[in-house]
Image (tube, rainbow, N blue to C red):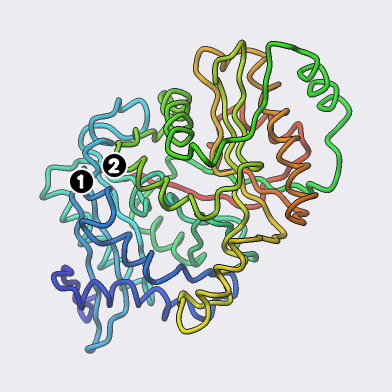
Amino acid sequence: MNDVTVTPVATKAERKEFVDLAYRMNAGDPSWVPPLRMEAMELVTPGKNPFFEHADVQLFLARRAGKTVGRISAHIDHLAVAMDPEQGMGPGTGNWGLLEAEDEAVAQALIGRAEDWLRKKGMTRVLAPISMSIWEEPGQLTKGFDHPPTVMMGHQPERYNTYIKALGYQPAKTLLTYELDITKDFPPLIQRIIQSGEKNAKIRIRNVDRSRFDEEAALILDILNDAWSDNWGFVPFTDTEIKYAGKKFKPIVREDLIMVAEYEGEPVAFMMTLPDLNEALKPMGGKLFPFNWAKLLLWLRNPRVRTMRVPLMGVRKKLQASRLASQLAFMMIEYIRRNSISRYGATRGEIGWILEDNQGMVAIADAIDSRVNKEYEIYAKAL
């Protein structure tokens, strides 16, 4: 490890080097999807990513014999630190993420430096990898290396698990994604539950209205913050983050793929589904110019995809223990399934991430005959 030097990112050129490294190190991995470089740069730039408004962040680069061989981010999310420790975060908990390492010695040097930075900032515990907010790409991939991730999911080399565990990290929480063949009808029991809901005059399942995008986005985030507020790892969205997320999602939002469930006229649940943008991005290598911008624009106008991803869904807390909650979920899934096939040519769905011990969501995933296709681990260590 003595031949590896780790230094903080301090200049615009070093920030660019931090971003560029991921493209070089993952170029040979057929399952890695290069993000657009402008978005990768935005993620780690103060003033661009609103995460920096409530977090202390330090990026580091590792060099050996004059060559950049690794990177890592260390960060303290003050909203996460303010949460109840029973929910996973809480006082004294810092994070690191965005790890890229040529070998184990580089990983050890980078993680060690991130831990030192967190320790000096008063942190007593680390949860990692989280890149950078819990809402972005949490966890180290532990299952499903043989196929690319869908939009907004991470992908890391399998060897990183060995590097992390060798430094004394223990599993804290497992995140799952489920895939299913959406060309098949759901089991008869689920169909009966959906049909029963359709006969209930108190239930209305509607598309979002894109002409009222800001209002609909605020409604969905309000339900989300309520539905997820007791979940492990939950950190509330700020107003700035809501606006930022809305701006980022707007180009790929389709009215018929995002549903709101109303009960007795009150919006009580939602399900967000996105066409898998990664299918369009993968061949672009992270570059929009000179010609990829036109290809992407055409795709966004009329996305034809194999996969639809459900990244977020939620039911207000007051209904979560009721049969109504699962009925509304099944109805939204079924309506989105139909639209995905008939209007976008999709054949596959992916739901997640879902906490392994979220019994309600796991039960819904099992009931529609989906199966786990990827697992991600968040590790913990005392500092």
Kind of element beneath mark 2? helix
Q: CA distance from mark 2 to mark 1?
A: 9 Å
Q: Please identify the residue farthest to the right as the structure is shown.
A: 188
**Would residue 287 appear left or right of 29 to someone viewing this image?**
left
Q: Which mark is residue 53?
A: 1
**Would residue 171 appear left or right of 267 to someone viewing this image?**
left
Tell me the residue at 38%/75% (across/down): 103
Disc 1 packing (10 Å; few <14; some 14–19; many ≥20):
some
The three-letter code of the residue at mark 1 reads: Glu
Q: Position of residue 298 (x, y in %)?
A: 60, 68
Do callouts 2 and 1 mark residues in contact (Cβ within 8 Å)?
yes
Q: Position of residue 178 (x, y in %)?
A: 66, 45
Q: Please identify the residue farthest to the front as the structure is shown.
A: 211
Circle 2 sits on which residue? 240
Tell me the residue at 20%/46% (across/down): 53
Instruction: Report the quarter where the N terminus lies.
Output: bottom left
Residue 110: name its quadrant. bottom left
The three-letter code of the residue at mark 2 reads: Thr
Q: Position of residue 238 (x, y in %)?
A: 30, 36
Q: Image height check: is 70 above or below 345? A: below
